[in-house]
Amino acid sequence: MDSLVLGNHCWLPDCLLQPLLTLREQTLGLGTQADRKLPAPTPGHLQQNQPLPVFPNPLCQSRGSTDAECQRNENPGLIMDPECSRLLPAFCSVLVDPRQAVADDTCLEKLLDWFKTVTEAGSSLLLLQENPCLVDLLSHVLDLKPQDVSPRVLSFSLRLAGMFAAQEDCFEYLQQGQLLLGLFGEAGPLSWAVWSVPTVRSGWIQGLKSLAQHPGGLHFLGDSGAVDALFSLQGDSSLFVASAASQLLVHVLALSMQDKAEGSPSLKGSAWPACAQKIVAHVEASLCSTTALQITQALNVLTTTFGRCHSPWTEVLWGQLSPLVAHLLDSEPVPATHSLVDLLLSVARSPVFASADCTLWETIARMLSCLSPMQTGPLALGTLKLQHCPQALRSQAFGVLLQPLACILRATAQAPGPPGLLDETTQGCSMTVDTLLSSKSACVGLLCQTLAHLEELQPLPQHPLPWPQTLLVEAVVIILRLCDGSAAPSSSEGCRLCGTLAGCIRVQRAALGFLGTLTLGTSSWELVPQVFAILLETLKSPASSPTVLKKAFQAVLHWLLDSPTPPGCSDLGPHTPLFLRELFPVLQKHLCSPCWEVRDSALEFLTHLSMCWGGEANFREVLLASDVPKLAWQLLRDPESYVRASAVTAMGQLSSQGLQAASDSPGHPEVQQGLVGELLHILSVDSEGFPRRAVTRVFTEWLRNSHADVVQDTEWFVATVLQMVSRDLDWEVRAQGLELVQVFLAQTLGQPNPSCPYAVALPKVTPPSPLPEVLRTLCQMQIFDFAFRALFDCDRPVAQKACDLLLFLRNKSAPCSGLQEAGDSSDVASVEATLERWQVGEQGQPLGSLEPEVVLAALRSMDLEGLQSRLAESSDHVEKSPQSLLQDVLATVALLEENVADCY
Amino acid sequence: MMALPYITEHTGFTGTVYATEPTVQIGRLLMEELVNFIERVPKAQSASLWKNKDIQRLLPSPLKDAVEVSTWRRCYTMQEVNSALSKIQLVGYSQKIELFGVVQVTPLSSGYALGSSNWIIQSHYEKVSYVSGSSLLTTHPQPMDQASLKNSDVLVLTGLTQIPTANPDGMVGEFCSNLALTIRNGGNVLVPCYPSGVIYDLLECLYQYIDSAGLSSVPFYFISPVANSSLEFSQIFAEWLCHNKQSKVYLPEPPFPHAELIQTNKLKHYPSIHGDFSNDFRQPCVVFTGHPSLRFGDVVHFMELWGKSSLNTVIFTEPDFSYLEALAPYQPLAMKCIYCPIDTRLNFIQVSKLLKEVQPLHVVCPEQYTQPPPAQSHRMDLMIDCQPPPMSYRRAEVLALPFKRRYEKIEIMPELADSLVPMEIKPGISLATVSAVLHTKDNKHVLQPPPRPAQPASGKKRKRMSDDVPDCKVLKPLLSGSIPVEQFVQSLEKHGFSDIKVEDTAKGHIVLLQEAETLIQIEEDSTHIICDNDEMLRVRLRDLVLKFLQKF
């Protein structure tokens, strides 16, 4: 019982979470269409034929179970239970039987995960001793004829052996039987025909990686010739294998240096362990190679090394290898530039080099000046993100990032910005100009990359200072003008750029994205008019694609909500009302667009704008003077479900803010009186889920915020909504219905108790009416009927929410003394019988009219806490258990055997 | 097309005009509408006083800037239209038309409108493609046939979009948005347009859009003297339509959805505003009518009816006229004006792709296409950019196309071909001598077998017949090969010639037989033996030379 009581306290009520979630959604801005609009997958259905027990069952309830048993029940994967031990021999014999192929290797993967947890939790040696079939499995795999070996079984065995050998005693145990040498040595799978299968090579590497955890393992690697094999696997045709080989080399290097170098940081490379020396020598040789592939492999190994190992020996390693790395820059063209950039950034990020000498910075500086603009971009961004970096290098890197924009400004004869700001950018400028002018793809690629990098850099605390806000805004504006063809440059470069960028949607999108973030930290309000002007032109242009329009709407939102106002100016700033007056006709046009994406974006924009500015007098005036509310209303009947959903949200928002005055005008009397009716109509008849979900969300918000249309008759409103929602096929709608009930109950019965001991205690809301009366009302509203049905919902989130709701109700009603403990016992039995039938899927029978006493008795007889904890487990916890996996494998084989028999 | 009567009826034209059937039928409709509009307002006297230069210069622009106004003609009559159309010979796509045996002309689908064509003009060894208004967009006509334009020596490129900066898709969106916005605000929409062409696509867009925009109850009126014919003709030219529309015909369904709009009474058409239309007219509504210049036709009435209300909107979709100039006489105007020119013809990006695909040796185009538009001189993308640079022409300029006709194709009659015995002189090259009579008629050349050798004259009649055929001399074999000088000299020595000298000349060698006072000039394509009246010696030397050469 104790644990059940504890379970009650652990409940974090969703009604407390919801405001936080809502707030988070709001701050995310305009979510992407895909994010919001994709049909949400049902998060795990409960199987109807396996109902979860709700009513206490004497056979299931083990009130006297020990803590260990509890833990065992909660974490069945951590131990090898007897049932699994019993199944293992059969399983192992199936694996080594060449006539019985394991069809589903995902089972093997899951079993490996399980073995990993088992070996991490206890002694592998003990496990092998208790289950000798496992060692037999490994031996049998080696004894099979090469043509009989299944690649997936071999891979499984290699990985399994590596897991066991990760513990030194078990490693020695396996070594005694020469098993490890057989599996990982040169005479093993390495020389078999099946080695050509990537899975086997991958399994071999992963097995070795698991094994290499202790000095014994390290020696084994050195003695077995595995390191040499890893060198060649670096160039494997399978990228996964090649990557795993590189990572294992890094792992081996780090392991061999782990003890040796820690005590003496100045230990020279020549005194390093043999294994480490061998790897470093291989890397050195690769760096001196003339083939780019080998250089790339060496650089990747080093990048991983410096990324993972932050011991002093890495400094020695860099000291030894940096001349070779620097030498790569002398080649023309510079090989493996991407990997080189990654390496330099990896070294620079390593805490070991925080106070390093300047060779690293010199190499980065050299690289920034000699690579092409497309290649230097990522290096420059990475450099600027570093916490510790010389100021000169930061300036150079920032100059590199700014170069393309500076070139655009120069080519279009714009002011080059504050003097001195772009002085550094003159160097290498011709290369940038060449790239911009060479071809459309090069120009577009460079600009998109630059804009994305600057967008990423802008909000970071370490972004360069001074941040040339004005210059950047001007550059982005001119880029947008080049894209829409309204720029009129006089230079030949400008004209060519104009030809290249005209109508380029990719650059337009990138520029609008960056322009949106440029509101952050903007202090000069003089920029606002030109930004508003270009945004308005983009929104007005018939050539703007739906994606461009969406980006433009987002940028407008940023600039409207965050744009600076001149000192002494309150409200919306001097430009905003004028802008809004021009914006709304454009918005009206887009609400009538034949392209549904545009209508949808326009509605989302309207929703966000009115959410933020619904109280601003200027905004209200312009909005109400336009036809926007009326058009939004008409879109409730749009043929596209996404648009209807957005229209529902927009209308809900407008209505909350009292922004439907225009719709009340004579000639449209039906509008206001029918908004609730219209939304209820959508909820009851709309064939798509999105609009119905939107309606339930709007209704919940209205209830939460005491919307005028709702407070007129809240009980009728909630009961009507629930009646429709309870029959809905969409689980999100049903879940949202429960959310609505939660809000209603919180308003009626008071907030749920805070579950977090550190949470600020909310003032207790006194229920407006006595509890028995409230419960009676709830019964009349059929809230219990709805909640009980939801409790047995085949979709887990709905059942969870219903369970939480009923627990809340039960707790609230606990101190209720006005009601008898139980009503008529026959009524209670009848209700329980009905609920049990509902539980097994027979929900046709109605619950009938309920009395509060009967409901309370039914609630108290239910094991809601037990149900809550079972619902908290993922829906596939049964299928994922090792026992089930083993049974699956065996059952599949049995089935195959039957089929074979049938054939004869 | 619209100027055809001026050519065929007023210039002494006696030739044949080739056109596809939809071009003729729709051209007739367009001309019929024009004549109808003009004849509705007959003038007792032609208004021509304004053509007086003193008066003309006082007129507002652009009239005052018009040149050669005295040569301007009155609009043609229906009689002239019919006469012009009677001179047309119908052709189908890919049909080959022989013009005097000199060239073959073939129309190809240009993808712009029903029956619109590009033309290939080719001889046996030269090919010129003439690209007129073409479209690569998926609209109602058959798609543009690009493959047949490949391997052209010259590609003449005309009829590009008049509004290269306006994307037709964006313009259609703009059209629909503004239309819906106006209607929802209780206003009317006027669309000045031609009775054929873009209107089919607009009606199709609206068909898809009106239900979603909640405009199902709004009447659409199409008013033109040829409205009915235009809507019906469009449905019967199945073979000229795009694949999707063609396949509808087999279902069978009308290829264009405007049939359904008419059936459901959403689209109504009338020959004019008088009569039935007056009874049916209700507002708010959408009216499609001509003429897009706003100078004549039913559109004038609607401009006057609706121009004073800001609720109404006029939406220009035809790119042929400046909308500001079209509106000038109606100013001040309260109604909203939206300019959505929908021109589906090729833009410069599409031209660039087309040229990469078709790869003509030379491109010839109007001068305007070789530089950016004057108003947007920085837009380097708004011009044709190809290698070699296009050859441009101005109005009325005569161009020599950049190729020479070097070969003619000659047919050989089968019996003559049978008699030929080719001899391989180099691997892969065989030669045969041909003796034949070249017969040329209608620019076609045929080699026929030569007449048999003349029989001994047995009568006057036969003698006369044999006079007609050319004399056939006995043919000597043709020689080929080269004479290796050193070996030739050795051969001479072997045959008893001595005192031989060889001199090199610019063209070959001279072999000097000093003793015999004889010269043998050996050049690339001739050998001369020069000796003084010693025929025996010459023949001996000739035979020695011939040993080194092949005969056939």
Image: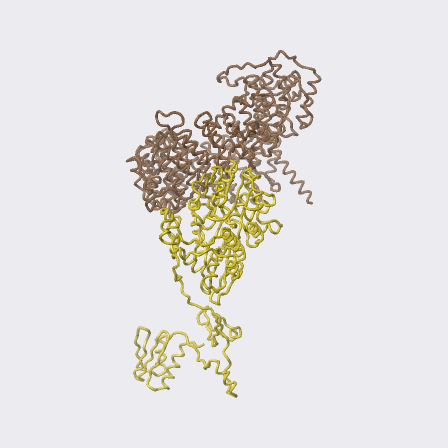
Q: Residue furthest right?
A: A826
| Res A163 seen here | no
Tell which of B364 and B437 is nearer to you: B364
Q: Which chain: yellow?
A: B
> Hey, which quadrant is residue A515 in on the image?
top left
Q: Position of residue A396 (x, y in %)?
A: 32, 36
Q: Quadrant of residue A102?
A: top right
Q: How many marks?
A: 0
Is the residue B59 above or below the residue B484 in the image? Answer: above
Query: Is residue B262 depicted above or below B518 in this figure?
Result: above
Quarter of the view holding residue A310: top left
The x, y position of residue B538, in whole percent, is: 36, 84
- Quadrant placement of the N terminus of chain A: top right
Give x and y (percent) for residue A630. Answer: 52, 32
Task: From the rendered image, report the letter of the chain displayed in brown.
Answer: A
As drawn, is A97 to the left or to the right of B426?
right
Horizontal arrangement in the rendering, residue A357 relative to residue B347 (left or right): left
Residue drawn 57% across the image and 48% down it:
B256
Between A517 and B322, the residue placed more toward the observer is B322
Instruction: Point out the residue furthest to the top here.
Output: A817
Let me know if residue B272 appears in the view.
yes
A838 relative to A614 in the view: left or right = right
Q: Quick one: quadrant of the C terminus of chain A?
A: top right
Where in the figure is residue B451, as x and y percent of width and height?
50, 80
